[in-house]
Image (tube, grey):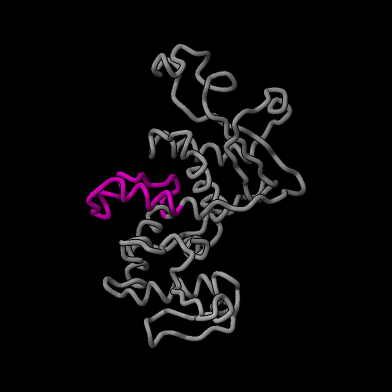
Amino acid sequence: MANRPKPVPQMTAGQFESRFPEGDDEACLRYLVARRWPEGVTCPRCGNKDLYDASSYKPFHWQCRECAPQGYRFSCLAGTIFENTKKPLRDWYRVAHYMFSSKKGVSALQIQHMMGFGSYETAHSMCHKIRAALIQPETKLGGIVEVDETFVGGKAKNRHYSKGRGGPGRGGLGSGKVPVVGAVERQGNVVARVIKSVSRDILSQFVTETVSGFWSIFRRGVVGTFHKVSAKYLPLYVAEFQFRYNNRFNPDMFGTAIAGC
């Protein structure tokens, strides 16, 4: 049996500090422009490429005359998760770097401690905004496709009576846990989605091996890193693990993520 390729090492902490020095906001902005518009800056509203460089007004600003009679002036942050943020762009980059440097993710509480944020809500919001930017559009898989599921949620015996305490089983259908179904092309990328319900007859038709590796990482991350994941935010955590898994052979996972933010 051929050896499986190993995940590609990502940017180290030293490389991050060298690329984005403390206090150098322009380095972060230049990186965002290069990743967001690799073929040249375009208007985020209409896609127009014929822009007026408004750097004399304010650095990293452009003006599009197609969107409005007086023109639409925008910065490289317009239309991104960084727009109107009160945190420096470098802080966003560091949070993203922490998230993508760990195979099983980093909790918002740990982000708060490492970044020195004054509140947990700040770290929680930033992490979720980054996860939301990682949600990929629907795609069709081809060739041999493996399908498997996992269930996320606490044991029934640990729930409050109003939430179904004493319900059946530790997991699976009928347990009250949230089902997450994943599909993966043979030796390809995984697509995982949180669903409201799933048929036992459908799941019984599939026996998989490849996608089980993804679920193993996902479950260990939920149990060991996040400890508790609500059904409300579960799709965001799934998007994070899906992105990290699908880019495990990408030498620039961080840059790919920033380009989608």
Determine whether, in the image, residue 220 is placed left or right of residue 48: left
Span highlighted in magenta in the image = 101-130
In this rendering, would 252 be left or right of 118? Answer: right
Position of residue 91 in the picture relative to residue 129 (left or right): left
Percent of width and height locating residue 25: 33, 74
Q: Looking at the picture, does residue 134 appear above or below residue 52?
A: above
Residue at 31% in and 65% down: 88
Most distant residue in the top direction:
166
In the picture, residue 18 is in which quadrant? Answer: bottom left
In magenta stretch: residue 115: yes
x%, y% of residue 247?
55, 56
In this rendering, the count of numbered labels is 0
Image coordinates for residue 76, horizontal then vertical, percent: 45, 73
217 or 153: which is nearer to us?
A: 153
Main SS class of the magenta portion in the image: helix
- Percent from the top left, x then y, of residue 42? 56, 76
Q: Nearer the viewer, residue 11 or 87?
A: 87
Specify whether residue 7 is painted magenta: no
In this picture, is 232 found above or below 10?
above
Pick whichever, 150 or 33, lies toward us.
Answer: 33
Query: Residue at 45% across / 11% down in the picture?
Result: 166
Give the quadrant of the N terminus: top right
Q: Which residue is outermost to the right? A: 143
Query: Please, which residue is most extreme toward the bottom here?
Result: 56
